Image: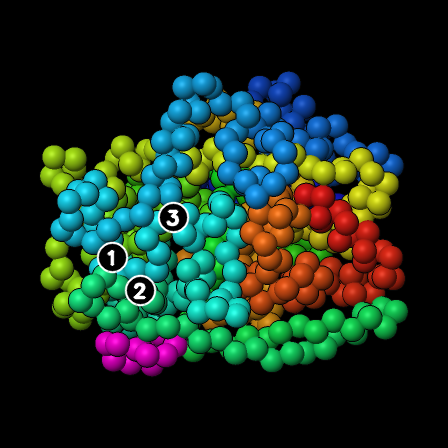
Amino acid sequence: MTERPARRLLAVSAAFTVAAGVLVLGSAHSQNRERDDLSEKDLKRVQAVTTLTTDFSKAEQYEAMSGGAATSLAKIDLNSFSHFSENISFEERETFKLGNALFQKLWVSSPSSTQASDGLGPLYNARSCQSCHIRDGRGHPPEDTADATSMFLRLARPAATPEEEAALKSFHAMSLPDPIYGRQLQDQAIPGLKAEGRMVIAYTEEPVTLAGGEVVHLRRPTYAVADLAYGDLDATTTLSPRVTQPMLGLGLVEAIHEADILALADPNDADGDGISGKAAIAIDPTTGKEALGRFGWKAQSASVRQQSADAFAFDIGISTPEVPLHQGDCMPAQTACIERPDGVQKRLGDAEAPPPVMDLVTFYAENLAVPARRKASFSGTLEGKRLFYETGCVSCHHPKFVTRRDAANKAQAFQLIWPYSDFLLHDMGEGLADGQQVGVASGQEWRTPPLWGIGLTKTVNGHTFFLHDGRARSLTEAILWHGGEGQQARDRFAALEKHDRDALLTFLESL
């Protein structure tokens, strides 16, 4: 079992800076260099409680409370991802419910009689946040229907000018849009306009034989676009399919001290363990400064608010103070789209979703609770947990953190949480590559997704599609797709006897 995460969990001695496109430890930077929110006594407590366990005979203390005191204790059902943090105040619960109403609101095209809902599109992928994040959970590929609402294609191309290269280097652009179709393929449009096109997916099956003779079929996808309404894509534009991610625990993730994430980074694999996670950089639109990226499939967003604003702009076509694009992702070449009226109401502000709307939606997203674990102390779960550690899965899926004592919302402050992610970028090999550079993330690198709640995907969303494009139809398939830095752990899983593989899966389903 690797000891790497435990060795480097705390006490980062220097801040990170950018060199050759990779975050490294070095000279002064705007990020905090160590846990400056803790007393010496608290620092020792945190270090003790977050050290990786070696005792798998019983559950760890508070292990079933994945989100600390914010953990939802509600019954397990279709709404298990939609409950508020248990430790928010009575007044905050009202704020949460108002945010939920806005999260579910259907936006309409301008002009309309419902002015507070004006501004949809003109080109878009969904009319509401909830349309993509179904019951606040995981998206899925279209499968047997044409419904691709919770899956979309990101578009990006290489820099073509020195100005574009400078924008990428400074992180003021995380990627560059297609000249005609922008940053995302919009497959819906308001009346009078044509949708940009539609995603086409084809799969081929590839058998993989595991120890003991079990054969698992992996499906390898290829992606294309059809019915392009405004001309061809640029020859250099790449397609990156993305399913929407679960919304739970986002405020807790934001409350993790950056020093604890940076302490897990090893961009040059200095310890030679084959794991070289690196931290992502994003520009925080509220400060205009560089910040640690921790949200999104490639950790392209620094905060829940930034992630929400990007979704408003590129999924729904709604402008916010953070992303003031009144026509959403329409490009200058799409003149009919650009000329459409927007939904800005000057009496409310200069954006279609003004600050009060963003405040409520952000609070809602920050306080969607993580469900409590199931069967965390059962012997089969504990055996699977041991195998999860011994196969090396914890090298990237880091089990636990203690959040900042000075978190903006006290509900997220100083909580022992169990997200099972290091929130770093890892090379996952050619099999999962999308060929698309986003910030410092290469075309083969992805942020380690948190695993909390993963065992309830079937219950909440009615499917078991995993990975960034939903190609995996089970947790077994998801593991077997791991390459690059995940190859060793994948191979160890494949070499386990079937009863051991089943035990590891039992552990994952308890999360």
Where disc 3 sits, the SS reads: helix
Chain part drawn in magenta: 225-238
Q: Is residue 507 visible?
A: yes
Residue beneath label 1, please?
121
Nearer to the camera, 395 or 348: 348
Identified at 33% across, 73% down, the residue is 197
Asked if labels 1 and 3 touch by Cβ distance under 8 angstroms, the answer is no
Magenta span contains residue 62? no
- Determine if residue 386 is in view: no
> Residue 392: percent from the left, percent from the top?
74, 53
Q: Quadrant of residue 179?
A: bottom left
Q: Is residue 237 magenta?
A: yes
Instruction: Residue at 71% x, 33% y: name it.
Output: 63
Mark 1 Cα within 10 Å, few/some/many (few <14, many 20+)? many
Who is closer to the viewer here, 167 or 297? 297
Q: Residue at x 23, y 76 (%)?
A: 230
Write down the residue under mark 3: 129
